[in-house]
Image (tube, rainbow, N blue to C red):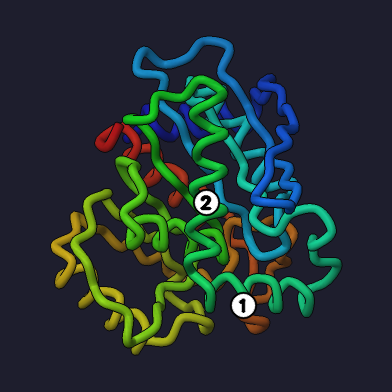
């Protein structure tokens, strides 16, 4: 574990990996994701697909992509909304994210298209993990529910719910949920329903709670006022990244 903390520190201060914009399409919709390739790839050419929070591709997701490339992984940031649909404020973001939460087949398709781009950049199709933040965390869980071919999924402070009438199918990817213990946007009912779903789906799952953390605890731009329900928490941010790296080591 001490070595993981060392890796965490080094990757925060050693981001030389370059980001490349990648254009692709969903029908007539133009999408622009970002790829970060390792200078020296891991032997298995592992890949990480990053699903950003509800405002779309942001500085945080780009920083994570560069960190992962420094660790030898191929990384790709998915564009879920597409050109012309990027939200300008939280109200627009809520509408966009709400659409994909209510139309999960469209969300699944956009995730798969981004995954295809990650593989095209050089990642091994059999050595991939999907991670997501907030809205993207919900997407990571949706990828597991949809049976998308990945080894594991990781949700950072994501929503856990699904429609009650959806059939629970067996979940094959390993699942890691990193959750703020004081997150007001994920009610206890949703947590219990998710945990039951994981058990019914015979999933290999873990859920880690971080004390004093609310929603968006990895987002440095979220401020530090927990009373707003969303705030950055430096300790939870660092701890969750270490737990994520441990998950990668086990899963890939």
Q: Circle 1 — which element?
A: helix
- Name the quadrant containing residue 164: bottom left
Where in the figure is residue 75, as x and y percent of width and height? 55, 32
Of labels 2 and 1, earlier in sequence is 1
Q: Circle 2 — which element?
A: helix
Q: Dot 1 corresponds to which residue?
A: 98
Q: Where 218 sits versus 227, above or below?
A: above
Q: Where 76 sits versus 10, above or below?
A: below
Q: Residue at x 41, y 73 (%)?
A: 160
Where in the figure is residue 98, as x and y percent of width and height? 61, 77
Please tell me the numbered disc located at residue 11: none
Q: Residue at x 36, y 49 (%)?
A: 148
Q: Dot 2 corresponds to which residue?
A: 111
Q: Residue at x 41, y 62 (%)?
A: 142
Asked if disc 2 and disc 1 are in contact, CB closer than 8 Å, the reply is no
Q: Quadrant of the C terminus?
A: top left
Residue 128 in the figure: left or right of residue 151: right
Q: Quadrant of the N terminus?
A: top left
Q: Which is more toward the observer, 100 or 43?
A: 100
Residue 158 in the figure: left or right of residue 17: left
Q: Residue furthest front?
A: 27
Please tell me how crowded label 2 is: few (under 14), some (14-19), or many (20+) other residues with Cα within 10 Å. Answer: many
Q: Where 139 sits versus 172, above or below?
A: below
Q: CA distance from mark 2 to mark 1?
A: 16 Å
Q: Which is more toward the observer, 54 or 31?
A: 31
Residue 164 in the figure: left or right of residue 238: left
Where in the figure is residue 227, as x and y percent of width and height? 64, 83
Q: Which is more toward the observer, 78 or 182?
A: 78
Where in the figure is residue 27, as x and y percent of width and height? 66, 51
Q: Residue at x 51, y 55 (%)?
A: 109
- Name the quadrant containing residue 189: bottom left
Please tell me how crowded label 1 is: few (under 14), some (14-19), or many (20+) other residues with Cα within 10 Å. Answer: few
């Amino acid at each position: 574990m001490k070595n993981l903390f060392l890796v965490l520190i080094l990757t925060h201060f050693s981001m030389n990996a370059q980001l490349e914009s990648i254009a692709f399409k969903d029908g007539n919709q133009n999408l622009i994701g970002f790829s970060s390739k390792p200078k020296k790839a891991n032997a298995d050419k592992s890949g990480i697909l990053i699903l950003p929070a509800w405002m779309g591709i942001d500085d945080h997701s780009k920083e994570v992509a560069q960190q992962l490339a420094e660790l030898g992984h191929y990384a790709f940031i998915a564009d879920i909304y597409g050109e012309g649909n990027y939200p300008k404020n939280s109200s627009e973001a809520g509408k966009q994210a709400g659409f994909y939460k209510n139309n999960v087949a469209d969300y699944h398709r956009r995730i798969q298209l981004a995954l295809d781009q990650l593989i095209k950049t050089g990642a091994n199709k059999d050595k991939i993990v999907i991670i997501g933040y907030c809205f993207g965390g919900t997407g990571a869980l949706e990828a597991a529910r949809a049976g998308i071919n990945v080894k594991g999924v990781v949700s950072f402070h994501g929503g856990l719910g699904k429609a009650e009438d959806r059939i629970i199918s067996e979940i094959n990817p390993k699942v890691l949920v990193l959750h703020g213990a004081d997150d007001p946007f994920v009610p206890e009912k949703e947590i219990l329903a998710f945990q039951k779903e994981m058990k019914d789906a015979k999933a290999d799952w873990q859920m880690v709670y971080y004390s004093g953390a609310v929603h968006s605890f990895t987002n440095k731009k979220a401020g530090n006022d927990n009373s707003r329900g969303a705030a950055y928490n430096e300790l939870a941010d660092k701890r969750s990244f270490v737990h994520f790296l441990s998950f990668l080591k086990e899963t890939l």
